[in-house]
Every structure is written in C-alpha cells, then in structure tokens.
Amino acid sequence: MKKGLSTFLSAVLALGTTGLAFAASVDQPSQQITNSANTRLEQRISGEVRHELNMIPQFTVFDNLAYRVDGGTVTLFGQVRDAIVKDSAEARVKHLEGVERVDNQIEILPASFNDDRIRRQVAVAVFNDARLFNYGIQPVPPIHIIVKNGHVNLVGVVRTQADKDSAFIRANGVSGVFSVENNLQVEQPKKS
C-alpha cells in the first residue's frame, strides 16, 4: 500500500511539473507575440511621427525636433525658434493612430537679434562649403543649426566624419559665436 501511494504521489508530482512546464512554454510565445506587436506598433508610429514633424511648414534648418516612442506615448524633444512649431508638432502627433499621449518637452529658444545674425552667418559658412553644399539644398536639410545666447549646437546626420569636422570648423569661424557643440551623427563611420 505504501508503495502504491508513493507511486501515485510520484505520478501526480510528475504531471504537475509537466503542467507547469507546458504552461510556461505556452505563456512564453504569447509574450513574444505581444512584444513583437508592440515593436511593430512603435516602428509604425515612429515613421509617422518623423513624417509629420518634417511636414511642419515653419520647420527650418534653425529648429531641431526629436522624439521617442514608448508604446502609445510619444515624447517630443528639441529646440525651436517659434512657439507655432512646438504647438504644431504636438497637434500633428496627437492625432496619429495608436498615439495615446504626447509629452511635449520642446524648448522655445529666446528671441535675440544677435542669435538670428549668428544663425544666418553659420548657415552661410556651413552650406557655402563645397563639401557641405548638397546638405543645404535638400527640402529638409539634415544639418540643423541651433543657436542659444551665442552658443551654436550642430545636430543632424552627415555622411562622413570629414563632413562633420568641416561643419564644425566652418561654424566655429563665425564671429560672435561663443562656442560650438558638434552633435552631428555620422552615417558612415571612418574606415580603419
């Protein structure tokens, strides 16, 4: 009788362990499917947000708009010269399918005649460079020149490290600039 009871308990324990393993294996694929669906949703939203931000009519080479998608929440970052761009960015993103919430952290740059002069001069210096000219003639230039209180921040994407260095040197040569921060990203890293 004791042997029968221990065999019965062993069988129950084995079935219980098998059931737990089966339940874990069933739960894992559904979690992977959910994560995959969330990733696809975020990628779709990300592409739509990028498109909407680039289509803002007042968005210029002197504005910087960035974003992060986390599920149904889109966080907007960057710096703009005009409050209209900030408000327009939020309004355009808010109505996208799948966006539940928009956290608008875009900074409005202070109005300054000196900063406006520096913006124009840096743009002329950078985009008149033979190496960088093609960046300036694109509908949405990939190099953005952000000026705040005489300090220049270059943001965007360039093809090579040489383009990044040229933009920095040209911007740094403009009179009245206190500092230049080169945050340009390079598409094609330097080959070793």
Image (cartoon, rainbow, N blue to C red):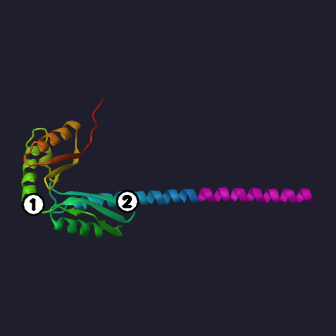
Residue, x 56% and y 56% (percent of image)? 28
Which residue is the site of mark 2? 42
Residue, x 28% and y 62% (percent of image)? 76
Residue 24's tag is: none
Residue 96 percent coordinates (x, y): 30, 67
The secondary structure that most of the magenta stretch takes on is helix
- Quarter of the view holding residue 103: bottom left
Judge left or right: residue 42 versus residue 31.
left
Amino acid type, callout 1: Ser
- Quarter of the view holding residue 12: bottom right
**How far apart, in angstroms, are the residues tagged by discs 1 and 2?**
38 Å
- Label 2: element kind: helix
Write the start and end of the magenta stretch as one range. Answer: 1-26
Residue 159 percent coordinates (x, y): 22, 41
Q: Earlier in the sequence, mark 1 or mark 2?
A: 2
Magenta span includes 90: no
